Amino acid sequence: MHNSTVKPPTVTSGGRHLSCPRSPPSPSPTEVAPALSILSAQPTTENQARGLWDLSLLRTPAQGLLKHYGGIPAGAMPKEGRRTWGAAPLTESTLELTRNILIAGRPGAPNMMSTYRAYLKWREAKLPQPTSPGEALAIFGGYLQEAGLKSSTCSTYLYSALFFEKRLGTWGNAQWFLAEDMIRALNRKACSEMREHAPDTNEERVQEILDTLRNEEVAFTIWAMCVCGGRAADLIRLGETGGSFRIHGDLVTVHFTLTKNRTEQCEQYSVTLPLWIPFRSKWQALAERVSPFTVTAQKICDTLHAAGYPETSYSFRRLFINHVIEQLTDKGLTNWLAVIELTGHQQVKMVKGLYKAH
């Protein structure tokens, strides 16, 4: 038996025999595709003067025989040009702006964080033994239900805790399905429970409230909610986001750029509606401001309760929606598509199931 040297296999290409090494060699400089842009921690002095950032941190060749970046052939990469941004240093103001934008992107985050903090305290006190996070959350849902909370509230609390558990933890066998099934079960159970909503009101009651309140900012906002249906926060945003509120004759035209449920640029909408509750001349100066509305929902509630009225801010949006439903119902049939167009909802089931049926 003689010794033999195992040669690497060869393949033929264009009549030539090419040796295939055991591992692919590092690409030559000519094989490295143009690098993707990346922001380095500090720009070089030369690039800083030119308004460019150091791109030397990323020199990754495109993948595969097709030389592609995520499926896009490297040949599509354009030549790098000068950008109008990138020279300024990263500052604390940048971080603060980033934090504020993130908070604005999820307005309900403070309530969710508060619920999650309470859940962690509960878990530490009630579940000392090891268990999967999904199982712990499911037990939390059952505990809340036994404590007498409404099923819809239990579901909301459980969702908040699940949201943070998934984002903050690195879990193995998490058994999230237990928590998700509990949320689904609680939502089904909530269908048989009486839904709580803001106290309903009527036109005569609103006129009485407007006559009683001394704070004209609050009174003007309540009136606007009744005639156009905007939430207090939606009305405040009108001046901040380029929306508009205009009274012309017996009509009001409102352009909503950002509302609770319409958060994308393509979801802006306008409504023109008759003033079914009369406008009062003393509000003229308020209506002509760049930002006509400044009163929060909490301020409205506090003012109403101090005056002895049980209504809340949302009572007046409910009045508007119920009024629209009534106007768009003929012989028991409601034009639900027109209802959601005027009320700013996106789904018929919301107004059909949660408001008055005429």
Image (cartoon, helix red, strand yellow):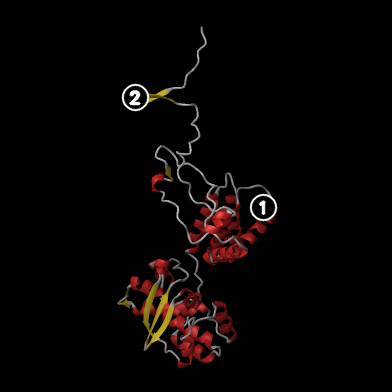
Q: Quadrant of residue 355?
A: bottom left
Q: Position of residue 139 (x, y in %)?
A: 60, 54
Residues at marks 2 and 1, CA–CA distance in whole angstroms? 72 Å
Q: Residue at x 53, y 88 (%)?
A: 216
Mark 2 vs mark 1: give the one in front.
2
Q: Residue at x 47, y 77 (%)?
A: 238
Tell me, yes or no, if residue 331 can be seen here: yes
Looking at the image, which is closer to me, 312 or 182? Answer: 312
Identity of the amino acid at label 1?
Answer: Leu
Q: Position of residue 255 (x, y in %)?
A: 41, 76
Q: Amino acid at mark 2?
A: Gly
Q: Residues within 10 Å of mark 1 (few under 14, many from 20)?
A: few
Which of the pair 16/125 is nearer the observer?
16
Q: Closer to the N terminus: mark 2 or mark 1? A: 2
What residue is disc 1 on? 127
User: Which residue corresponds to mark 2?
Assistant: 15
Q: Position of residue 262 (x, y in %)?
A: 44, 68
Name the foreground residue: 145 vs 122. 122
Furthest toward the top, the residue is: 1
**Residue 117 percent across, percent down from the top left:** 64, 60
Quadrant that contains the C terminus: bottom left
